[in-house]
Image (spheres, grey):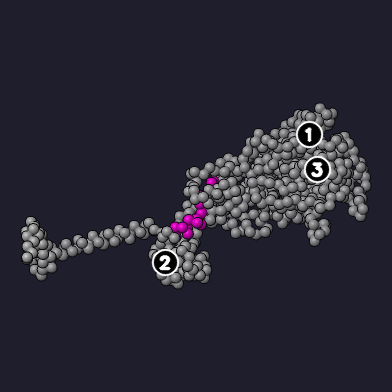
Amino acid sequence: MPEAPDTDKKNAPGAPGRVRRLKAFFVKLFSTDLAKTPGRIKLIACVFIALYAIIGGKLIYFGLHQEQTPEAKRGGGDVVAEARPDILDRNGEVLATDIKVMSVFAEPRRIIDKDEAVELLTAVLPDVDATDLRKRLGSRKGFIWVKRAVTPQQQQEVYHLGLPGVGFQPENKRVYPNGPVAAHVLGFANLDGVGISGLEKYIDGQGLADLHGAGFSLTPENLAPITSSLDLKATYAVRDELAKGIAKFKAKNGAAVILDVNTGEVIAMASLPDYDPNTPADALDPNHINRVSVGVYEMGSTFKAISLAMALDAGKVNLNSRVDARDSLRYGRFTIHDFHAQHRVLSVPEVFTYSSNIGAARLALMVGVEGHKAFLRKMGQLTRLHTELPETADPLVPKNWSELNTMTIAFGQGLNVSPLQAMMAVGALANGGVLVNPTFLKRNEADARQGAPRVIKPETSESLRYLMRLNAEIGTAKIANIEGYFVGGKTGTADKIVHGHYADDRVMTTFMAIAPADHPKYLFLTLLDEPQASSETAGYRTAAWNAGPVTGKIIERVGPLLGLPPRFELPTQPFPLLAKLGYGMANIPQTGGREH
């Protein structure tokens, strides 16, 4: 039976009409009827204008928002410099901070013509090595750095090259607005934002590196600044005076420090020659080491302060005791003599003011080898000093400690310690007898003394303050007795060891000073390596003639900056404990004497 026709489809309402209308539209559109040509041209022009507008808009968008491939994002994210907290001085001045910069990267797999890319990029970035860049662009890596932290002008020039596969990555750059000032304390961070030395490395060790590694997105706004113990103005002044002293006395290098004896805060520090942390490659020069905490030296006669404190605290002598210094002191084939021999019996204060090697050695022998070692260990002189700075060194301690070692170490030869380590011990002698570990972070006295051990009695501490003041009045520290600051001090001159033997013509000079001696606040140290004698120094190259004057200049310049205004009336009873013990002469200013 034949199939019935599909009358429903055939008679669907409106279907033939739509088809006819579409057919008529296209016939008219492509018709050659000249009367209708202008309308068609306008329509086609509008369509093309719209298409070009869309394409142009997309190009502008891609130019302003360069989209990195997922691979490039992963590659860049692994090495981009993350934010770091600001480092401030104790008064809020910025010592280290971040700035936003753009870095140029490339995706080698997307570079079409590598030779052309190398030629164009090195023309804009002349300090990029063309051979190295060509080799890295030829690798199969998904991401490489072309140049980190480009200038805005360089960024624009690279952008206008229009190279596919070359883009920009925003990141942080560490900057140090004060240049080399405090360089050894701050250290530096590399281009990847990783702390390499100094406080920068310490900050990473406190958890910053772990936060970055865990993928936390940190900004300067959500990172609390680190407040250091440094005073920027005082640090600048110390560095400036040290540089002048090195030049004046033709020394090879030098260092200077100011330590708060009550809190242990390092207020200022300079070690010259230094470097600018904005160009950290200079830090690799071995001559640019931090001589305050990394260098270890024989501290010379400044160690006599520790030796006298040891004998006084052990009760072996008092300030009225006398020590035989009539003749040189012989031990086997070795002979100990005084630089300015008096050839007579000396009082304990005279041992200090005449800087008698013989007297210091005899006092140490009274305590004995084991007692001497125990006292130095208690004073932190036989183990490595630990502070926030990772750059420290172990002291050089005699392997077989004999009586001869005790005798020579008593006047500062035979034991090498860092200058900051020696300052910690002398700071305890000045602050009442508490050993406060130095710090490069701001803190108060209560926090500093919490858990700090008492190492000598308060009356021993006052005795040492008196001896240092007496030395500034009539002894070797007289040249640093800056009027108005009631300074106390001790010189130190050590022959340098050259090829295993002490050299007669090369010395390391040290000067330590406290101010004010009645209630010490600050301990000053200056160290000069191989200063030269001159007519101005009467032919001497000892500390009293070079490190001493430099320290005096520093005290005079930074005293007002640190809240130590000059006092032109001497205190009436600077050493009350000694007066109670019967040493009333300690409160009577001394005059005369000789400089030596």
Q: Give the residue drawn at x 56%, y 53%.
A: 194
Q: Are marks 1 and 3 in contact (CB under 8 Å)?
A: no
> Foreground residue, 384 or 20?
20
> Foreground residue, 318 or 467?
318
**Stretch in magenta:** 72-86
Q: Give the residue drawn at x 82%, y 58%.
A: 501
Relative to 468, 59 lies left or right:
left
In this rendering, the label closer to the viewer, 2 or 1:
2
Sequence-wise, the earlier of marks 2 and 1 is: 2
Q: Give the residue drawn at x 76%, y 47%.
A: 382
Does the image show residue 490?
no
Q: CA distance from mark 1 to mark 3?
A: 16 Å
Instruction: Please tell me whether residue 83 belongs to the stretch shown in magenta.
Output: yes
> Can you give x and y, in whole percent of width and height, for residue 68 in the image?
41, 59
Instruction: Give the total of numbered labels.
Output: 3
The N terminus is located in which quarter? bottom left
Q: Give the residue drawn at x 49%, y 48%.
A: 216
Q: CA distance from mark 2 to mark 3?
A: 69 Å
Relative to 315, 42 lies left or right:
left
Numbered disc 1: secondary structure: loop
Label drawn at residue 374:
3
Residue 556, image quadrant: top right
Numbered disc 3: secondary structure: helix
The residue identified by callout 1 is 457
Relative to 470, 156 lies left or right:
left
Sequence-wise, the earlier of marks 1 and 3 is: 3
Residue 453, image quadrant: top right
